[in-house]
Image (cartoon, rainbow, N blue to C red):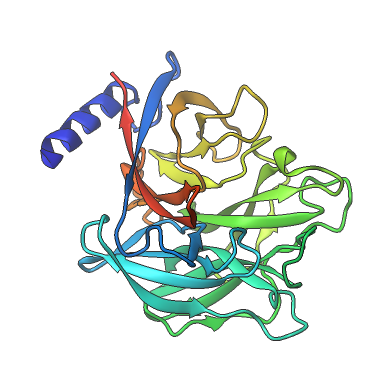
């Protein structure tokens, strides 16, 4: 049944794309997202799991990283990871990254991880804040990086400082905070998409930016066209043919929310699909993300934050289907 569904999905994608896998521009498609529970990293009394990374496959195992703590927000967490043979049943393996030393920029929390595989190594991007969580809370988040020769660690921070920090120009879209790295390899460079918020703006006014580096560890240079998408609170990006696609959640101007946006150049995005029931803070299985193959398509599945009144946040699975 799975094989048949995959063949049908590929056939429908082909009818809505050009020969080079780029989306056709003469029609707006529709993507429907289904949600299912997972074992091993699902709802658990007293445990918070949220902000899952994109999923990678190493040998026979899928890997995912996520924030884990004891309160609902991600502002008092450390980074943990889990593995699975099928994407449904997961085994939690342990902590990958602890908080930074007292007084450092990431001493309060390390959370919202994401992964890059490049140059024979694994690169774990994460968000950090400096202060313990209290109410009210004003996050000063920045993006850091750790590296390992194995997806199982040990992980070593590549620098005591963040690799991308908020802009010092109050007029910039990311002058208050930055968060939520999502990586692809493109034009032999490392493209880091992230979300930012301007000083004085609310979370509902979060926008999406791009920074590019020649090597995984940086330096990452902001693109002059930032912000590349005028919204989006969860950064989910993948190679789509020779271009780049992004799934937009519920944050941003009405014309872009709950859509897929596509950019042939990875910078200037426009709508190609409506999304029904999209993931909340999703991380996708994107097998072409780091290959520069030109064969990337809509991710078939991934993981997301699950919510229930009786539990702290947990990890769920989502599956995408293009409606006929």
Q: Nearer the viewer, residue 258 or 292?
A: 258
Q: Nearer the viewer, residue 228 or 198?
A: 198
Residue 242 in picture, x, y percent from top left: 42, 39
Kindly tell me whether residue 151 is visible in this rendering.
no
Q: What's the residue at 45%, 35% (across, down)? A: 278
Q: Is residue 146 left or right of residue 2?
A: right
Q: Quadrant of residue 157?
A: bottom right
Q: Position of residue 177 (x, y in %)?
A: 75, 56
Describe residue 85's horizontal placement relative to residue 29 as left or right: left
The single residue placed furthest to the right in the displayed view is 170
Residue with the most extreme top position: 26
Horizontal and vertical percent position of residue 51: 52, 57
Classify residue 87 as left or right of residue 79.
left
For the point 59% across and 59% down, the residue is 72
Q: Mark yes or no: residue 246 visible.
A: yes
Q: Quadrant of the N terminus?
A: top left
Closest to the observer, 2 or 218 = 2
- Which quarter of the rendered picture does the C terminus lie within? top left
Name the quadrant containing residue 207.
Answer: top right
Residue 307, above or below 19 = below
């Amino acid at each position: 049944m799975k094989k048949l569904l995959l063949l049908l999905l590929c056939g429908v994608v082909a009818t809505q794309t050009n020969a080079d896998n780029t989306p056709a521009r003469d029609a707006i498609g529709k993507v429907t997202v289904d949600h299912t529970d997972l074992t091993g990293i699902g709802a658990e009394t007293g445990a918070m799991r949220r902000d899952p990374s994109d999923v990678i496959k190493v040998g026979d195992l899928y890997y995912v990283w996520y924030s884990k703590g004891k309160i609902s927000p991600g502002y008092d967490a450390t980074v943990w990871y889990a593995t699975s043979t099928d994407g449904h049943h997961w085994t939690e393996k342990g902590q990958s990254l602890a908080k930074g030393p007292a007084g450092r920029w990431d001493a309060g929390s390390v959370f919202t991880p994401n992964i890059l595989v490049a140059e024979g190594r694994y690169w774990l991007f994460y968000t950090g804040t400096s202060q313990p969580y209290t109410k009210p809370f004003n996050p000063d988040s920045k993006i850091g990086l750790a590296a390992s020769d194995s997806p199982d660690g040990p992980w070593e921070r590549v620098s005591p400082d963040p690799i991308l920090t908020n802009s010092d120009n109050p007029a910039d879209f990311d002058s208050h905070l930055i968060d939520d790295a999502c990586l692809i390899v493109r034009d032999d460079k490392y493209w880091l998409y992230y979300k930012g918020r301007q000083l004085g703006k609310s979370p509902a006014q979060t926008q999406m930016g791009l920074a590019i580096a020649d090597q995984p560890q940086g330096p990452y240079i902001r693109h002059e066209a930032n912000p590349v998408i005028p919204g989006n609170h969860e950064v989910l990006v993948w190679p789509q043919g020779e271009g780049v696609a992004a799934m937009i959640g519920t944050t941003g101007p009405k014309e872009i929310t709950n859509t897929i946006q596509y950019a042939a150049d990875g910078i200037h995005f426009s709508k190609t699909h409506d999304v029904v029931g999209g993931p909340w803070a999703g991380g996708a299985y994107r097998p072409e993300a780091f290959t520069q193959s030109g064969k990337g398509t809509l991710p078939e599945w991934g993981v997301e934050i699950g919510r229930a009144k009786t539990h702290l946040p947990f990890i769920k699975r989502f599956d995408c289907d293009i409606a006929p």
